């Protein structure tokens, strides 16, 4: 049963990270719209989508029960609110960076993020790593350090993305709420602010939504679906697998993002990038192998030999 839960968790997480890795393509089509307006629409339409989903799945009663439970369990409600703030900050930084031609630095941020997740798993959740996994973390850290140093300036975008999403993952791990209910409440907390900001833009006359381009309007509305779906799968994955494993699967996202930045949007890829990739992918390979039966059997045999000696 546990193995099935782990496999399902890996698939959920991998699907979420695949969508996030391809996100730059979508946000590039919204160039000309301010990151603040994109974020406001993203929050609003995510909430609308979640309301429809909760209605279709008939979970309004369950949502009401969860809200009522916050009276007794204020910590859960507070963690959910913190999660919504963290993911909103992450969205804004990411959208701004992509449209400011900083795709490479966003990929750096999501390369750093798994290390943040692993460390949070170790220090906050007391998750234990094997020797092979410690080595893999060290290799990944070297690769990220090479990228960071080669960047030539303090990578504030990368670090902001890494820590906001790393802490978001931790918050989701600590919240034992149905993923659909949790995401509906997350977006509900922020939607009033998003709606007020959209109204403000309309009053000011400085808005892109409903300003003439129906194609742009559709893209802004669909951003809600594209935001909610991977977050739902991420939440399902986070509840089923260790935070450290979740962190390493996340390397899918920055790898896809970096490929897009280099081969689609012509951002530079140097020999330094290649060197760092060797370290990072070696770490990922080692970590992946450490979760297989081959490693488990090897470690068991070593423990048995040492006990007999």
Image (cartoon, rainbow, N blue to C red):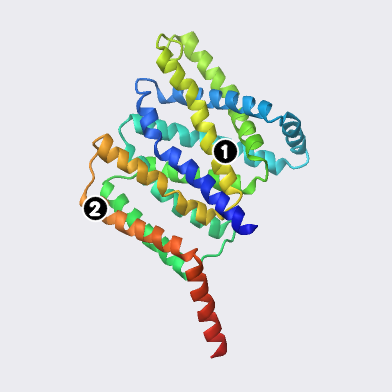
Q: Quadrant of residue 48?
A: top right
**In the image, is 218 to the left or to the right of 68?**
left
Report the residue marked by disc 2.
272
Report the residue marked by disc 1.
232
Does the residue at mark 1 contact the one at mark 2 (Cβ under 8 Å)?
Answer: no
Q: Position of residue 242 (x, y in %)?
A: 56, 55
Q: What residue is rendered at 32% in x and 50% in y?
A: 148
Q: What residue is rendered at 35% in x and 61% in y?
A: 282
> Dot 2: within a 10 Å radius of its alpha carbon, few (fewer than 14), some, or many (20 or more) residues?
some
Q: Is residue 123 visible?
A: yes
* In the depicted structure, whether residue 164 falls above or below residue 47: below
Q: Position of residue 250 (x, y in %)?
A: 45, 48
**In the image, is 269 to the left or to the right of 86?**
left
Q: Is residue 164 visible?
A: no
> Dot 1: within a 10 Å radius of its alpha carbon, few (fewer than 14), some, or many (20 or more) residues?
many
Q: Position of residue 231 (x, y in %)?
A: 54, 38
- Element type where label 1 sits in the image: helix
Give the residue at the far bottom of this rendering.
Answer: 309
Q: Position of residue 92 (x, y in %)?
A: 45, 31
Q: What residue is rendered at 45% in x and 14% in y?
A: 209
Q: Quadrant of residue 63?
A: top right
- Quadrant containing the N terminus is bottom right
């Amino acid at each position: 049963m546990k193995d099935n839960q782990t496999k399902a968790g890996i698939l959920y997480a991998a699907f979420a990270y695949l969508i996030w890795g391809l996100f730059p393509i979508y946000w590039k089509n919204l160039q000309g719209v301010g990151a603040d307006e994109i974020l406001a629409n993203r929050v609003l339409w995510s909430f609308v989508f979640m309301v429809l989903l909760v209605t279709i799945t008939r979970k309004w009663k369950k949502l009401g029960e969860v809200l009522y439970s916050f009276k007794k369990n204020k910590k859960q409600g507070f963690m959910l609110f913190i999660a919504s703030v963290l993911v909103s900050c992450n969205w804004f930084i990411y959208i701004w960076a992509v449209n400011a031609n900083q795709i490479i630095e966003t990929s750096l941020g999501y390369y750093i993020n798994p290390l943040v997740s692993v460390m949070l798993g170790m220090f906050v959740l007391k998750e234990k790593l094997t020797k092979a996994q410690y080595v893999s973390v060290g290799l990944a850290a070297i690769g990220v350090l090479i990228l960071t140093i080669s960047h030539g300036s303090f990578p504030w975008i990368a670090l902001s993305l890494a820590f906001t999403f790393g802490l978001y993952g931790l918050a989701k791990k600590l919240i034992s709420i149905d993923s659909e209910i949790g995401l509906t409440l997350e977006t509900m907390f922020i939607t009033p602010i998003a709606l007020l900001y959209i109204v403000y833009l309309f009053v000011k006359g400085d808005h892109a939504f409903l300003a003439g381009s129906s194609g742009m309007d559709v893209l802004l509305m669909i951003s809600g679906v594209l935001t909610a779906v991977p977050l739902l799968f991420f939440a399902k994955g986070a509840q089923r697998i260790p935070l450290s494993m979740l962190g390493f699967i996340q390397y899918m996202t920055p790898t896809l993002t970096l490929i897009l930045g280099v081969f689609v949007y012509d951002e530079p890829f140097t020999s330094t990038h290649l060197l760092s990739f060797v370290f990072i992918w070696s770490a990922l390979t080692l970590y992946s192998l450490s979760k297989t039966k081959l490693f488990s059997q090897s470690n068991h045999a070593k423990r048995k030999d040492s006990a007999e000696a």
